[in-house]
Every structure is written in C-alpha cells, then in structure tokens.
Image: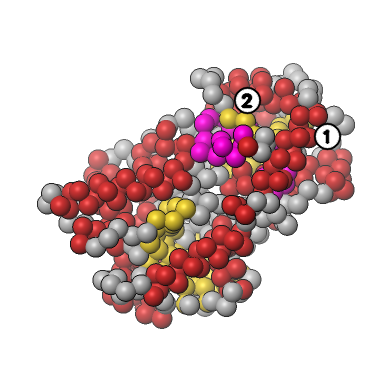
Amino acid sequence: MNILWLHQYFATPQGWGAARTYELARRFVRAGHAVDVICCAGYDASLAPTGSMPTDADGVRVFVSGTPYRPHMGFIRRILSFLRFTGYALWFVVRRGRRYDVIIASSGPLTLALPALTGRWLFRTPFVFEVIDVWPDSAIAAGVLRNPILKAMSFRVEALAYAHAAAIVTCSTGMTARVAGKLTGNRTKTRAGESGAAAGHRPPPPLLTIPNGCDVAMFAPDETRRRATRERLGVAEGQLVAFYAGAMGVSNAVDDLVEAVERTARDDRVIWWIAGDGAEAGKLKHAIGQRGRWFGTVSRSELPDLYAAADVNVVTFRHEPLFFENSPNKFFDGLAAGLPAVFNRSTWLAPWLETYACGLACDTDAPGAWLAGTIQELAADPARLQRMKRGARRLAEEEEFNRDRQAQQYLDALEQVRHATGYP
C-alpha cells in the first residue's frame, strides 16, 4: 500500500512529542508498505522544513512544513498555525493525493479532516480518521474553545469527518464510546432531516480502538543505567524520584502538581523531576525551585535514562469527565520502564492498574494533597514500591499494548479499507 499520514504533531525519538505515528509508520514500512507523513516541526526540532523533497525517518518519508507551532502559543496563534498547516496539507493532497491507496488523518487538530476529505472527494481515496484527541469536545472542556461560531464550525467539520471516513481509530475505549454516540446522533439527525451528513445513506464506519503502546526495548529497566543516572543527578540512596514528563497546558491540571510539590517540600525522601513544556510550565518551574530538578523539554531519546532512574510516574489531567478517556503516552513509557503510575483522577486504565497492582488513581476531591500523600506512602514502603514496579513491567509486556501487534492490527484495518466495496 501507499499510505499518506497527515499528522501535524509527528515526532521522531529526537523530538519531545509523542512517537505513536513514528512507531507505527516505521513498522508499516518494515512490513513492505510505503508511508509518507505530512507534519510540522512543532514537537521535533530535528525536523527541518523539507520543501518538495522529503526527509527519511527509518524508511518513512517525512514532508515537513515550515508552519510554526509550540504548545505554549496563545489561542489565536494556535488557530492560525492549524489553518496554515491545513493549507499546506491540502495543497499536498491536491497535487499528489492520487498516488495513495489510503489516507490517515490524525486529530487534533480537527482541521486535518479537511485535506483528507478533499482526497476522498477528488480522487475517491478512502481515509481513516484517527482520534488521538476528541476535538472539539476536549478544547471546549479545557476552556480553550469558547466562541459559538467556532464551536459550530468545529462540530460541522467533525460530523463530516465521521460521516465520510472509511474507518475511525481511537486511542481508548472511552473515546470509542464517545465517537459511537456521535455517529448515532448524526444518523438520527439525518433521518430527521436536520443534518446533511451522509452517514444515514450507508452503514457507519467501523470503529477500532488502538491505544498508545509500550516501547519495551527502548525503556527496558537497566540497573546500571539507573545507578549511573541517579549518581550523576545527585539522588541519595533511599530517595524516591517522582517523575512528571510531558505537556503542561490547561488540560494537564498543573495546579495539582504544584500542590503536591509544595506539600512534599520538607520530606527529604522525595525528589521531583519535571520534563516538558507548555502554557502552565512557569508556575510548576517556580514551585520546583530547590525541591527537585527541572529539565525543560528533552528529546524522547533522552527519556529512557530519566525513566530508568525514577521511581514513580506521575500522570495528571483536568477533572472534567472527558479527560477520563485520555490515553497518555507518558503512562505507557512509564510502564515500559517498570514505573508504577500515580494518577490525579479517575481513568479508563484503572482495571489494568488494579489487575497488575501497578498504579493508583485519586478518588478524592483533594487531588494535590492525595498525590503528595500517596507518593510519601510509597517512599515509606520500598517493598510495595518494588512489587508495583514489577507489575508495571509485566503489563507493558502484555499483547494489549505491544507496538508490533498494534501495527499489524492497524494494517489489517487499512487493508480492509483499501479493498472495501461500496465506498462512495
């Protein structure tokens, strides 16, 4: 197959963004398929704008737009970035779209549905709509999208994407249920004559859940590396390192982290390591002060050393119901490194945390205090901490989150889309 993948946030291990697309795409190539990715360099500074010629990433041809993007941008600048990148992808599809057997459009941003729809309408190329973030719901829940006109436009684009996709892939069971509900709602509106969505004229597209995966080789626990990194970074024997890596935006409940850091400030058993960036980074950096280490943005290739040397993987999201569905990359990286996860809220991943005894999720209305107390309890119980670490690594090695298995599952879906009959 010739596959075109539209993903503005694509990153290689040299970047600091999520590597889901990279990891799956390179496995597609290894299986004998050709993959072209359209992206910008917002999460990977190693990707320079390529013009009309691609760069190579482990056999994946990557076309890099010069579109500026950083997660700490304000709302207007982010919207302009999304539109500019969408224009770049749209022009690419118009010029070269005919050569592809299938298009994958990864959202967010939701605007990437537009070039995929264009390929479908111009060349009858089927597309898979990948829901990494349920837009516009998540933007509304985070308080970022408030304008009623933009909301209406976003819901319209979302309805078109769901209606005309040949298949939909999500990252969690909760996202799948949410999208299934939207598909049902769109079909009901169509029958009532309230919507122009085409979904009422054919069966709804198949829905597939492929969560983020664990890179078990890249993050394999290594005691020699652990000791060397802890010694280099000044961690004393018996101290617990609580590690948070990733985005620090309005969706990430940074205030919970700040409170947890402040509440453990006088506990010499606990050290905080923070890596990442975002609009809320400043308040967390100020709170860390001398209580830990601030790394800022680090490449994914640097993370294995930090995960190997840490003890607890801290995962935080806003407390709106929608964020229950999130499939955080940091959680899966931590599993692969054998780190128990501590969530500041309920999560769809709770059954695995319980079955493998490899993590805890806050069930109180004081998440900052709960995080601090839970981390201190683990610092005081090294035996329990070691049991949880072993459970985390066991879960990482299960087939559910195995990258190779997930890539084959994805390829099977793409083959079905390619050969499906009756795709209008």
Residue 283 visible, this angle: no
- With respect to residue 266, does 331 lie above or below? below
What kind of element bears circle 2?
A: helix
Residue 209 percent coordinates (x, y): 47, 53
Q: Quadrant for residue 266, please give it.
A: top right
In the rendered image, which quarter contains the C terminus? bottom left
Q: Residue at x 78, y 25 (%)?
A: 381
Whether residue 348 is in magenta: the answer is: yes
Give the side of residue 308 with respect to residue 156, left or right: right
The boundaries of the magenta stretch are 335-354
Which residue is the extreme one toward the front?
355
Residue 130 percent coordinates (x, y): 43, 57
**Label 2 Cα neighbours within 10 Å, binned few <14 / some 14-19 / many ≥20:** many
**255 or 128, nearer to the observer:** 128
Q: Are marks 1 and 2 in contact (CB under 8 Å)?
A: no
Residue 237 visible, this angle: yes
Q: Residue at x 77, y 45 (%)?
A: 308
Residue 125 percent coordinates (x, y): 35, 74
Name the residue that disc number 2 marks: 371
Please report whichever mark, 1 or 2, sits nearer to the chain's N-terminal start: 1
Could you give the CA–CA distance between mark 1 and mark 2, rounded to whole angstroms?
21 Å
Give the side of residue 78 with respect to residue 224, left or right: left
Whether residue 210 is in magenta: the answer is: no
**Label 1 Cα neighbours within 10 Å, binned few <14 / some 14-19 / many ≥20:** some
In the image, what residue type sits under mark 1? Val
**355 or 255, nearer to the observer:** 355
- With respect to residue 323, does 257 lie above or below? above
In the image, what residue type sits under mark 2? Leu
Give the side of residue 142 with respect to residue 404, left or right: left
Name the residue that disc number 1 marks: 235
